[in-house]
Structures are given as structure tokens and as C-alpha cells.
Amino acid sequence: MCRSIKTLRPPTTPEVTDEDIRAAALQYVRKVSGFRAPAAHNREVFDQAVEAVAAATQELLDGLRIRGSAARRHTHS
């Protein structure tokens, strides 16, 4: 779907920051909406979508169990 979204799960990415998650969420919302930057009248719903996708991404990453890898390490800024 969006080639610029990088894989964030271990062991591909040993440390994932909040900025990494938000950047992936932003790319996803941009792709789905078709807007790189929304008009003022769409800004609130666009930003809410980015936050919702970022939260869902964090929840997913926190819940993944990767066989053969050490305990997941990530930082929350």
C-alpha cells in the first residue's frame, strides 16, 4: 500500500520511537485520504486519524510476540 512506511517490529527494527510510530501513521493517513496536507476544514479529522492510527500501531507492536527474538524494547518519548 505505502512503500514509504517501514516495518517497525523486531527484529527488523530493534528500537521503535514514538516519532517512528507517528511517522508511519501520518504516511498511512496521507495515503488513505489522498491529502499530503489537509485543508483547514479537514485538519481536525486528519489529525484525529493520525493519532488513532498511531495508538493502534503502538497497541499492535506492544502485543506482538516474535519467536526467537529477545524481549521487545521500545522507547516512548
Image (cartoon, grey):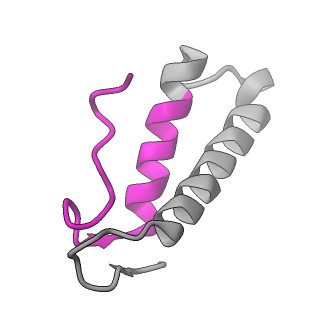
Point out the image quarter for the N terminus: top left
The stretch in magenta equals 1-29
Instruction: Please name whichever residue, 47 or 69, is drawn nearer the observer in this view of the structure.
Output: 69
Residue, x 50% and y 40% (percent of image)? Answer: 26
Instruction: Please name whichever residue, 2 or 12, is drawn nearer the observer in this view of the structure.
Output: 12
Whether residue 36 is visible, yes or no, is no
Q: Which quarter of the figure has residue 14?
A: bottom left
Residue 26 falls left or right of residue 48: left
Residue, x 62% and y 54% (percent of image)? Answer: 56
Residue, x 40% and y 80% (percent of image)? Answer: 75
Task: Name the outermost residue toward the front.
Answer: 67
Task: Name the outermost residue toward the top.
Answer: 34
| Residue 39 versus residue 14 in the image, above or below | above
Instruction: Please name whichever residue, 55 or 68, is drawn nearer the observer in this view of the structure.
Output: 68
Instruction: Please name whichever residue, 70 or 73, is drawn nearer the observer in this view of the structure.
Output: 70
Q: Where is residue 73 in the image (x, y as percent from the top left)?
A: 34, 82
Q: Position of residue 12 (x, y in %)?
A: 19, 59
Residue 60 falls left or right of residue 14: right
Residue 13 falls left or right of residue 2: left
| Residue 75 versus residue 64 in the image, above or below | below
| Residue 50 versus residue 33 in the image, above or below | below
Whether residue 43 is visible, yes or no, is yes
